[in-house]
């Protein structure tokens, strides 16, 4: 038996609507595909300063529908999925103890640049554990980010060890904290979004490879488009609720589309011949390991689900493959990331598409 707690009153600040964001299609698509299938492994967004990276990610978190969580659980545990439950909640389910369910907005957790490993992973109070015989755990940012979005701005300036910890948790869906022989683990399944400015240095290729997708964003050059973006921002700042109301219908439609895509995803089929061709592209580009193949398969399926289809098309692969492979071509840390031209060229050759075709 479950008890549903009343939703808290709406006191959140107003966020710029996702559907009102002009341009940056590559970044928006990469983020939406990761929401549909978090196993894609997150997205690295590299681009100029002031191009709306943070605004877009906050808008995405605000767009997502509320999720059912176990009330008063620090890990946002799911009341149904055992893989998204903390050990304590799983124990209650096993013992058939009723759970109180609450609805909660999907969390977007900002990771500050100066964060310590304890702040990120959580800490174990050894004194309390030894004196009272209980596992006294103070949850960190990974616990808060479970079933949500973890955003790391300037990820290329973050300590490599911390980036490793984040990527390990994102890949396994669990965070383990060990100290003085005491070990605690909790679910930490989140969409990892890193952003940075290439001028401030690149991530090491080994770390870059662990991000599922890589989106490049550039400052909009067309003057009319720039004017439109500036005017929209001014309208939003003048009266945020009124501005958001204009986009309410579009926001709700996109939210429904994402929910349907998540439901449809398990039924989506990727033909064997297309899978072979994806691997052929990866092989031709000399991509290390199999992450590129796996992520491209997942992204193409997520895109088909987003379009409401159960069969992946060549066009789905074309739209996803650059995002999945461009950052895996680097062998030399000093080499800049290929813009995607090499990937498109290899894709066209393997799939037999004329180079002049769009």
Image (cartoon, rainbow, N blue to C red):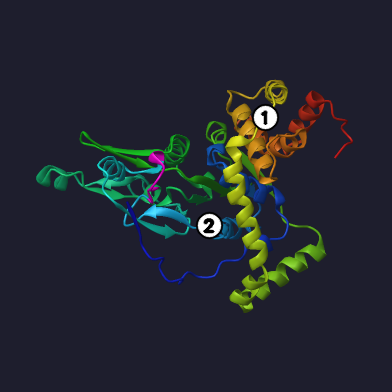
- Placement of 305 over or under 101, stated as above or below: above
Labels 1 and 2: the sequence-earlier one: 2
State the image quarter where residue 320 is shown.
Answer: top right
State whether residue 44 appears in this view: no
For the residues labelled 1 and 2, the Cα–Cα distance comes to 28 Å
Magenta highlight: main SS: loop
Q: Residue furthest bottom?
A: 238
Residue visible at 72% across and 72% down?
A: 231
Question: Which x, y percent locates residue 250?
Answer: 67, 62
Foreground of the two, 66 or 219: 66
Which region is colored magenta?
Answer: 76-83
Crowdedness near tag 1: few (<14), some (14–19) or many (≥20) residues, C-alpha within 10 Å: some
Residue visible at 38% across and 48% down?
A: 79
Question: Which x, y percent locates residue 181?
Answer: 21, 33
Q: Which residue is mark 2?
A: 65
Q: Is residue 136 left or right of residue 186?
A: left
- Placement of 173 over or under 1, stated as above or below: above
Question: Which x, y percent locates residue 88?
Answer: 27, 44
Crowdedness near tag 2: few (<14), some (14–19) or many (≥20) residues, C-alpha within 10 Å: some
Q: Does the magenta-highlighted stretch encompass residue 302?
A: no
What quarter of the picture does the C terminus occupy?
top right
State whether residue 55 appears in this view: yes
Foreground of the two, 255 or 168: 255
* Secondary structure type for disc 2: loop
Question: Which x, y percent locates residue 256?
Answer: 61, 55
Circles 1, 2 touching at the beta carbon (< 8 Å): no
Q: Is residue 227 left or right of residue 262?
A: right
Q: Which residue is mark 1?
A: 270
* Secondary structure type for disc 1: loop
């Amino acid at each position: 038996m479950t008890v549903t707690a009343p939703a808290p009153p709406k006191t959140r600040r107003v966020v710029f609507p996702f559907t009102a964001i002009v341009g940056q299609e590559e970044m928006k698509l990469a983020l939406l595909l990761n929401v549909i299938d978090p196993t894609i492994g997150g997205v690295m967004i590299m681009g100029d300063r002031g191009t709306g990276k943070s605004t877009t990610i906050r808008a995405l978190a605000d767009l997502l529908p509320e999720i059912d969580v176990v009330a008063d659980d620090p890990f946002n545990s799911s009341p149904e999925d055992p893989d998204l439950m903390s050990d304590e909640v799983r124990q209650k389910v096993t013992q058939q103890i009723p759970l109180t369910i609450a609805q909660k907005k999907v969390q977007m957790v900002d990771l500050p640049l100066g964060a310590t490993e304890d702040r990120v992973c959580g800490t174990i109070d050894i004194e309390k554990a030894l004196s009272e015989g209980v596992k006294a755990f103070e949850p960190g940012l990974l616990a808060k980010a479970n079933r949500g979005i973890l955003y790391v701005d300037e990820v290329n300036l973050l300590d490599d060890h911390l980036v490793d910890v984040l990527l390990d948790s994102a890949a396994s869906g669990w965070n383990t904290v060990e100290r003085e022989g005491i070990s605690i683990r909790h679910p930490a399944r989140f969409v990892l979004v890193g952003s940075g400015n290439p001028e401030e240095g690149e991530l090491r290729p080994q770390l870059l490879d662990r991000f599922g997708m890589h989106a490049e964003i550039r400052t909009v050059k067309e003057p009319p488009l720039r004017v439109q973006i500036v005017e929209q921002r001014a309208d939003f700042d003048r009266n945020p609720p009124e501005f958001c109301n204009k986009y309410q219908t579009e926001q709700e439609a996109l939210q429904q589309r994402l929910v349907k895509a998540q439901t449809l995803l398990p039924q989506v089929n990727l033909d064997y011949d297309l899978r072979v061709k994806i691997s052929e592209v990866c092989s031709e580009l000399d991509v290390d390991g199999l992450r590129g193949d796996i992520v491209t398969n997942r992204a193409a399926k997520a895109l088909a689900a987003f379009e409401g289809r159960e069969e992946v098309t060549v066009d789905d692969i074309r739209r996803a493959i650059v995002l999945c492979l461009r950052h895996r071509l680097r062998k030399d840390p000093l080499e800049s990331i290929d813009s995607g031209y090499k990937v498109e060229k290899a894709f066209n050759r393997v799939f037999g598409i004329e180079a002049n075709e769009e």
